[in-house]
Image (tube, rainbow, N blue to C red):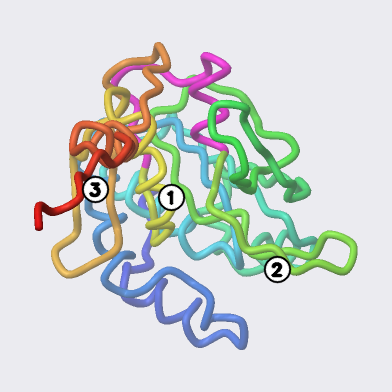
Amino acid sequence: MQPTITLQALYEFFAQHPEGRWIITPQNARYLYHYVKEHPVKRILDLGTGIGAAAAIMALALQNKGETDYEIHTVEQFEKCYKLAQKLIPEELKEHISFHLAEAMVWQTDLIPYQYFSRFEQLPERNWDLILIDGPGPFMEEKHYLELPNGDIMKMLLEGKLKQGQLIAWDKRIIAIKTLERYFSDNFYLTFSGEGSDFKILEVKDVEPKFIDTRYEDLKNQGYFEPWEGKAREQ
């Protein structure tokens, strides 16, 4: 059965909630809705449920294009949001959405020393068509406040869990995108960038990790690391 709710009404419903200040922006919500509706995606992983706005928007897009065999798995770090999303998402959109609660953790790879990333402790595993990155959000570890770039996609790439042609949508998270561009530029290419927006979609072009520090290579090629061999001026 087709949902009777509209995108605008659905967005306003979430935006007017007391926790609505944290949801996806109106512009990015439109980009997400139309991209899902216009492209062949049916298996979606949503990292960072929040209060459920993005998951509901994607479910609406899938139903409005007539999909019946689809699934959205959404992962959240905070129990408050995990429960609230299940309460707020309209019943007519909830049938194909699965909710997962997972802790946010610090992650590091030896390929990039001295840099730390956040990731979810556990993720459901499917043959995803689209992964939306909007988490983990900032969190406390003991007495430390941590706000780190997402490392789940990098970790999945290094563990062989990405597939060619897979789409990775980013709501904000610009630092994480720049990290992939710097170290794994041969594994992804930009397939969509919202005009005047921080909403971007990368496509996996190679599942074999192609690590290279492009920033280092650029500086090396410019002679930055060569010893200075200046000579004293002739008097």
The numbered dot on residue 78 is none
- Tell me, yes or no, whether the highlighted magenta stretch contains residue 153: yes
- State the extent of the magenta-drawn residues as a range: 152-168
- Look at mark 1 in the image and give the residue it sits on: 59
Res. 181 visible in picture:
no
- Look at mark 3 in the image and give the residue it sits on: 35
Of the two numbered discs 2 and 3 on the same chain, state the one appearing first in sequence.
Answer: 3
Res. 178 visible in picture:
yes
Residue under the point 22% across and 33% down: 189
Q: Amino acid at mark 2?
A: Leu
Q: Nearer the viewer, residue 64 or 163?
A: 163
76 up-or-down from 223: above or below: below
Mark 1 vs mark 3: in front: 3
Of the two numbered discs 2 and 1 on the same chain, state the one appearing first in sequence.
Answer: 1
Q: Position of residue 45 (x, y in %)?
A: 51, 38
How many neighbours does mark 2 have within 10 angstroms: few (below 14), some (14-19), or many (20 or more)?
some
- Residues at marks 2 and 3, CA–CA distance in whole angstroms: 26 Å
- Tell me, yes or no, whether the highlighted magenta stretch contains residue 220: no
Q: Amino acid at mark 3?
A: Tyr
